[in-house]
Image (cartoon, rainbow, N blue to C red):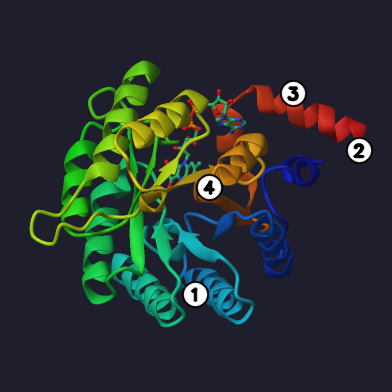
Amino acid sequence: MGKKMSGRFVAGMSVEEALAACQRVNKEGIAVSLDSLGESVTTEAEARTSADIYHQLLDAIHTRGLNANVSVKLSQVGMDFDPALAERIVGEMVEHAAHVQSFVRIDMEGSPYTEATIAMTERLAAKFPGAVGTVLQAYLFRTEGDAERLLNEGIRIRLCKGAYKEGPEIAFPAKSDVDSNYVKLMRRMVTFSNPTTGKGVFCGIATHDEAIVEQMRAFVREHNIDKSAFEFQMLYGIRRDLQHRLTAEGFGVRVYLPFGPEWYPYFMRRLAERPANVIFLAKNFFKN
Ligand code: FAD
């Protein structure tokens, strides 16, 4: 039952199913970030198994000409027990991505990982510029500083609100403050220009919040910002209407497409974000 219910947000169990879903999404003019679900592995063998799947994905992206990149979590490749191993494994993925002109996005997990994730992204980006980026969360107080840090280094940022439980000493407790910070940061990201090179940094505006999407559209219009400076990003299966509308308007849209047998924690976070999903999924389940 759980598997069936998660099907709305998880694009299948196998690499082949994920690639087929990717192809379908690409046909709609939407790019993809493939995420092989998994977190908190405890052995090197598990970390290597996760990595193998990512190498298969990068090969398939290349050989099948998919409009896709990959997203990975550090806890999935050994960060909890051997950070050096995690860095070697992600480094190999980034090197592979650089060879096939793709890209690795290091997802952001809870706050114990924030600094380590940013620092690792910086080291890898120094070796493989343009092939790796990370995610910043608008609910954290520190994010404004982190955004400046990454922008000045030319590292691509995906901006999201943040999906983990964080305390009021480090994160905005009120949703309205998170939203305002999000808007402030997204504006900064799309107007940033490096003082030496004059170059901007391509970034991902990851949200389903229509009010924020509207503000971005208005901001881009008013400031004459090229649509190629950024892309909207949404989760697979969520607000497909909005994804299609933005694509039709000529905005870049990328869908984060999770797959794999380890769907449970991902699925539970999506339910926690929007309890109405439980009703939605339950209705769907009983219909099928
Ligand atoms: P909200 O204010 O939560 O929601 C706005 C509206 O969007 C809601 O009213 C509803 O209509 C719709 N909506 C939002 N969520 C759902 C849902 N689950 N189901 C149905 N409708 C929904 N978080 C991290 O901490 N680290 C990451 O690396 C990360 N990567 C992400 C990548 C992408 C592409 C996206 C889109 C999100 C990512 N997130 C990540 C999750 C993010 O932090 C938020 O938890 C999530 O996107 C919900 O916030 P929102 O911006 O959509 O706005």
Residue kind at label 4, given as amino acid type: Gly
Q: Residue 149's spot in the image, x, y percent?
A: 16, 50
Compared across the picture, whether 232 is left or right of 282 comes to: left
Q: Tell me whether the residue at label 3 lies in contact with that at label 4, contact meaning CB atoms closer than 8 angstroms.
A: no
Between residue 187 and residue 2, name the one nearer to us: 187
- Whichever of labels 3 and 2 marks the residue nearer the N terminus, that label is 3
Query: Which residue in the protein does label 4 denote?
Result: 250
Between residue 151 and residue 164, name the one nearer to us: 151
Number of numbered callouts drawn? 4
Label 2 packing within 10 angstroms: few (<14), some (14-19), many (20+): few
Q: Tell me whether the residue at label 1 lies in contact with that at label 4, contact meaning CB atoms closer than 8 angstroms.
A: no
Residue kind at label 3, given as amino acid type: Ile
Query: Which residue in the protein does label 3 denote?
Result: 279
Q: Which mark is residue 48?
A: 1
Label 3 packing within 10 angstroms: few (<14), some (14-19), many (20+): few
Element at badge 3?
helix
Q: Is residue 141 above or below residue 4?
A: above
Which of the two discs, 1 and 3, sits closer to the camera? Answer: 3
Element at badge 1?
helix
Q: Is residue 213 above or below residue 267?
A: above
Q: Would the CB of label 2 be found within 8 Å of ligand 1? A: no
Element at badge 2?
loop
Q: Quadrant of residue 87?
A: bottom left
Query: Which residue in the protein does label 2 denote?
Result: 288
Q: Residue 58's spot in the image, x, y percent?
A: 53, 75
Q: CA gap, disc 3 to disc 2? A: 14 Å
- Whichever of labels 3 and 4 marks the residue nearer the N terminus, that label is 4
